[in-house]
């Protein structure tokens, strides 16, 4: 089970590879995740936003979790499974499944589309936390349509079994306030704000771009943790052009294209309503990949 002390460093929210027919490509998944695990990541996140969770059915989720557990058998890296939906009952069902399959924690997003009140959000997380598996709450108002207030975030983080928060609120304000109150750990979820949020109290990051450059993001964190702030800032600044390209169109489309071009996965296929990236972005990312080839490990 994931503990608060383990919520630090770089967590990688992985993509869900699909073949050309749109079915889960387990061969690609296993090869690609194995490569990521060659780096000193602190957590592997399956079925998050980057994993196209709204399009992954519960049987496919079980396949992905089982494959991930096999890959992690000889590793101390915790497995976090995205189980949050905009329906509390569905969230509880998926959270129970993840617990039964041996996940170390679940990632539960603020309910999307329905735009619940802060009281409704609190009730939603209370039900998820009652399952008993550790919960990382996930605030991403740009996708959900509603964000956590500081008071709501504090209330959720005070719940038993809630062990931390992924903050994609778009600014360091929330993590700054929570840190001031001495809250449970917060992970930055906005890649472009990673360096700034470390400086405002974030314990690390759950970063989609780390699919492409895991070692570099880990190095930034290590520099920061050891007090080498100038080196951390320089290393982060070197990644900013790539981060901007990877989020120029909807995540995870650019990341999947990049991974497929580099051979990490077989296809950049996405499930509708997401579609592949534009030709112009392909050209920009292709130039970046040509100038900065990925060093793949078996």
Image (cartoon, rainbow, N blue to C red):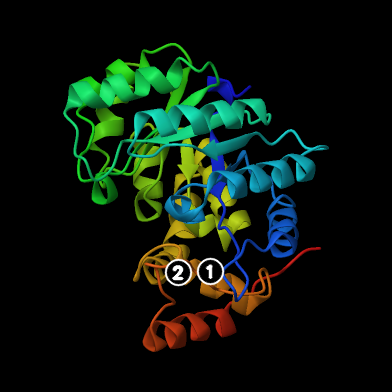
* Residue at image location 75% in from the left, 52% down from the top: 38
* Residue at image location 40% in from the left, 70% down from the top: 241
Q: Quadrant of the C terminus?
A: bottom right
Q: Nearer the viewer, residue 26 or 4?
A: 26
Locate residue 135, reporting x and y percent. 48, 25
Structural crowding at the residue carrying mark 2, measured as other residues with C-alpha within 10 Å and reported as few (<14), some (14–19) or many (≥20): many
Secondary structure of residue under mark 1: helix
Q: Nearer the viewer, residue 295 or 235?
A: 295
- Where is residue 88, by image quadrant? top left
Q: Nearer the viewer, residue 257 or 144?
A: 144
Secondary structure of residue under mark 2: helix
**Residue for badge 2:** 253
Locate residue 105, reporting x and y percent. 56, 28
Q: CA distance from mark 1 to mark 2?
A: 5 Å
Q: Nearer the viewer, residue 61 or 6?
A: 61
Residue 279: mark in rendering: none
Count of marks, rendered view: 2
Locate residue 108, reporting x and y percent. 42, 34
């Amino acid at each position: 089970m994931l503990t608060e002390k383990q919520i630090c460093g770089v967590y990688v929210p992985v993509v869900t590879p699909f073949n050309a027919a749109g079915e889960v490509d387990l061969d690609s998944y296993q090869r690609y995740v194995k490569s990521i695990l060659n780096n000193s990541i602190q957590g592997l996140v399956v079925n998050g936003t980057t994993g196209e969770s709204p399009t992954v059915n519960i049987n496919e989720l079980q396949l992905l979790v089982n494959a991930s557990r096999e890959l992690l058998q000889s590793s101390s890296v915790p497995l976090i499974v995205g189980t949050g939906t905009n329906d509390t009952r569905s969230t509880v069902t998926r959270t129970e499944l993840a617990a039964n399959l041996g996940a170390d924690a679940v990632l539960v997003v603020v309910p999307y589309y329905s735009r619940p009140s802060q009281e409704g959000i609190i009730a939603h997380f209370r039900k998820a936390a009652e399952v008993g598996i550790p919960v990382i709450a996930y605030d991403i108002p740009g996708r959900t349509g509603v964000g956590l207030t500081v008071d709501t975030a504090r209330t959720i983080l005070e719940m038993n079994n809630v062990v931390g928060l992924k903050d994609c609120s778009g600014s360091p304000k929330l993590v700054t306030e929570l840190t001031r109150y001495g809250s449970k750990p917060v992970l930055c979820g906005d890649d472009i704000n990673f360096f700034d949020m470390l400086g405002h109290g974030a314990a690390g990051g759950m970063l989609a771009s780390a699919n492409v450059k895991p070692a570099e993001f880990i190095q930034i964190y290590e520099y920061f943790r050891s007090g080498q702030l100038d080196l951390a800032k320089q290393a982060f600044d070197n990644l900013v052009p790539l981060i901007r390209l990877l989020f120029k169109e909807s995540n995870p489309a650019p990341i999947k294209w990049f991974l497929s071009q580099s051979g990490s996965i077989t296809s950049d296929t996405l499930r509708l309503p997401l579609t592949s990236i534009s030709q112009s972005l392909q050209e920009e990312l292709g130039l970046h990949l040509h100038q900065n080839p990925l060093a793949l490990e078996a």
